[in-house]
Image: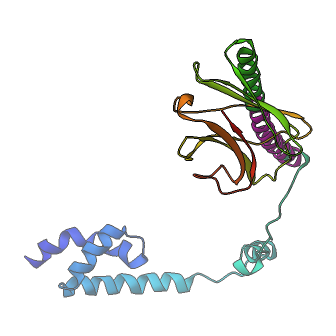
């Protein structure tokens, strides 16, 4: 019975002795050898034969050319090359082109922003000029002179149409962190902001439309002060002038 069990394994013993058996078959045969003394004995015989075959073959020294080829393939013979940045002219030209394109785009962005600011200022000046021209043509419009040292100008006012325009010559230049702020003054003395502006350099006349969310008939005066930043909730800086309606 034991001989019949060993039949499927004995065919693989010669290859196992020579180390030529598939890994899957090796695991199966190895498990069988642990329990079968006959197969272990047969494996020992085959291994003795295999050793004899190896010893019967005379050793040969490798040729000089083969030895040299093998030595060049050893890890110790491999030279570690340092990574180098190989910049060809094409890569340099491409990098330079990308840099110039980015610089041009940044420059264009700031130029467009400056142009948009100039266009907004020009549109505001045109609007103020048109409003002033319209008020001058209305027979009921009031022309209130500005009386202040070093300044000359007029406040054009039409309460019926709820429109007012400020025309001032020679306003002093301000710091970039300051603005002029227009205030509407009611009979109780309360000030309501009516817009901020910054006079243009080298431009003698400043024209500003007075912006009010209320009816101008509710007010009896107008003043201008110097304020920080984008303006104040209530006047806090020096007063430039005041005009009573």
Q: Position of residue 100 (x, y in %)?
A: 85, 43
- Is 115 a magenta residue? yes
Quadrant in the picture for the N terminus: bottom left
Q: In the picture provided, is 40 more to the left or to the right than 51?
A: left
Q: In the picture provided, is 192 more to the left or to the right than 87?
A: left
Q: Please state the extent of the stretch shown in magenta in the rendering.
A: 92-119
Quadrant of residue 42 within the rendered picture? bottom left
Q: Position of residue 109 (x, y in %)?
A: 76, 39
- Is 215 a magenta residue? no
Q: In the picture provided, is 115 more to the left or to the right than 51?
A: right
Quadrant of residue 196 within the rendered picture? top right
Q: Position of residue 214 (x, y in %)?
A: 51, 32
Colour theme: rainbow
Quadrant in the picture for the C terminus: top right
Give the residue at x 87% y 54%: 87
Q: In the picture provided, is 90 more to the left or to the right than 54?
A: right
Give the residue at x 84% y 42%: 171
Q: Position of residue 149 (x, y in %)?
A: 87, 46
Give the residue at x 13% y 73%: 5
Give the residue at x 27% y 79%: 30
SS majority, magenta: helix
Nearest to the observer: residue 88 or residue 50: 88
The residue furthest left is: 1
Nearest to the observer: residue 40 or residue 167: 167
């Amino acid at each position: 019975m034991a001989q019949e069990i060993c039949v499927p394994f004995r065919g693989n013993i010669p290859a196992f002795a020579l180390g030529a058996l598939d890994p899957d078959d090796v695991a199966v045969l190895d498990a069988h050898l642990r329990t079968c003394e006959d197969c272990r004995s047969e494996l020992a015989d085959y291994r003795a034969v295999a050793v004899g075959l190896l010893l019967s073959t005379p050793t040969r020294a490798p040729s000089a050319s083969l030895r040299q080829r093998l030595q060049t393939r050893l890890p110790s013979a491999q030279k570690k090359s340092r990574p180098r940045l190989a910049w060809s002219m094409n890569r340099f030209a491409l990098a330079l082109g990308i840099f110039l394109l980015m610089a041009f785009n940044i420059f264009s962005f700031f130029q467009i922003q400056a142009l948009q600011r100039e266009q907004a200022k020009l549109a505001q000046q045109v609007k103020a000029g048109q409003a002033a021209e319209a008020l001058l043509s209305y027979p009921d419009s009031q022309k209130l002179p500005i009386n202040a040292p070093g300044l000359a100008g007029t406040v054009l006012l039409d309460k019926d149409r709820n429109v007012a325009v400020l025309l001032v010559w020679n306003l002093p230049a301000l710091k970039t962190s300051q603005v002029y702020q227009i205030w509407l003054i009611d009979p109780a003395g309360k000030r309501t902001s009516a817009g901020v502006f910054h006079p243009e350099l080298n431009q003698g006349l400043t024209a500003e439309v007075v912006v009010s969310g209320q009816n101008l008939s509710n007010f009896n005066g107008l003043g201008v002060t110097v304020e920080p930043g984008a303006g104040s909730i209530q006047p806090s800086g020096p007063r430039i002038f005041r005009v009573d309606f």
